[in-house]
Image (tube, rainbow, N blue to C red):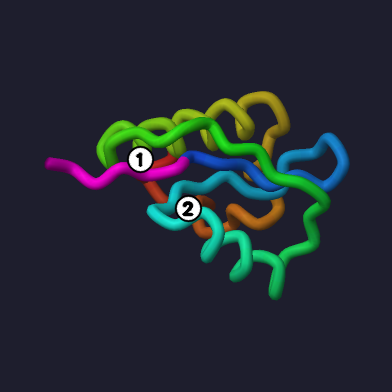
Amino acid sequence: MEEKMTCYKLYRGNEIVYVGITNDIERRLGEHKRFKNFTKHKTFGKIILSNAKKWEIDELKKYRRNKGRYPEYSKSAIGSTEYD
């Protein structure tokens, strides 16, 4: 059985600054708080890993299409053929 992942976004005001997935949202938010400037987060449910990866890629593609760039802290997506 595939692991369940939480899909989430970090915001600064109304601007999305990060899109991600994790198997432990509390731990991951703690990690983000040390290095990222964000004011709120929103979770989008727990789904199996393969679907969570697809959600993350789709959300990054949608953001890039609308804004012409990736979210500020989603820089690892830049140049990755997985996201283009």
The numbered disc on residue 79 is 2
Residue 11: image quadrant is top right
Residue 76 image point, x, y percent: 51, 59
Residue 7 image point, x, y percent: 48, 39
Residue 16 image point, x, y percent: 72, 40
Please state if 67 lies on the left or on the right of 46 as rendered. right
Residue at x-position 24% and y-position 46%: 3
Dot in front, 2 or 1: 1
Give, as a single range, the part of the protein colored magenta: 1-6
Please state if 51 lies on the left or on the right of 39 as rendered. left
**SS type, badge 2:** loop
**SS type, badge 1:** helix
- Residue lying furthest right: 13
From the image, tell me which residue sits under label 1.
53
Residue 32: image quadrant is bottom right
- Of residue 66 and residue 48, the one placed in the foreground of this image is 48
Quadrant of the frame with the N terminus? top left
Q: How far apart, in angstroms, are the residues tagged by discs 2 and 1? A: 17 Å
Q: Earlier in the sequence, mark 2 or mark 1?
A: 1
- Of residue 2 and residue 72, the one placed in the foreground of this image is 2
Q: Is residue 72 above or below residue 55?
A: below
Please state if 62 lies on the left or on the right of 3 as rendered. right
In this rendering, the count of numbered labels is: 2
Which amino acid does the dot numbered 2 rest on? Answer: Gly
- Of residue 82 and residue 58, the one placed in the foreground of this image is 58
Indicate yes or no whether the magenta region holds residue 72. no
The numbered disc on residue 23 is none
